[in-house]
Image (cartoon, rainbow, N blue to C red):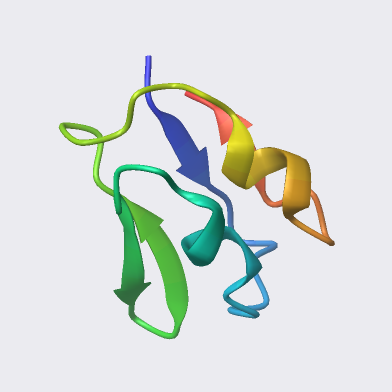
Amino acid sequence: MAYKVTDACTNCGACESECPVSAISEKDNARWIDPDTCIDCGACASVCPVEAIIAG
């Protein structure tokens, strides 16, 4: 199951550079994870400073 970005996202971008498959992009002033591309590795969640990324 793909990871998801919650409303707590501050759009800092830390997660985007950590994603090995480039599944994260900016959408509506926050980050968004493409569920079809996400490989469920959790790298993004581990670097989020506000814990805004959760397993979906």
Residue depicted at 45% across the width and 48% down the height: 19
Hey, which residue is sitting farthest top in the picture?
1
Q: Is 44 on the left or on the right of 16, as rendered? A: right
Hey, which residue is sitting farthest right in the picture?
49
User: In which image quadrant can residue 8 be found?
Assistant: bottom right
Residue depicted at 64% across the width and 68% down the height: 14
Q: Is 15 on the left or on the right of 19, as rendered? A: right
Residue depicted at 31% across the width and 33% down the height: 38
Q: Is 34 on the left or on the right of 14, as rendered? A: left
User: In which image quadrant can residue 9 be found?
Assistant: bottom right
Residue 2: give x, y in percent of width and height.
38, 25
User: In which image quadrant can residue 24 be found?
Assistant: bottom left
Residue 37: give x, y in percent of width and height.
20, 36
Q: From what the image shows, is residue 46 above or below residue 42?
A: below
Q: Which quadrant, please, contains the N terminus?
A: top left
Residue closest to the eye, 20 or 34: 20
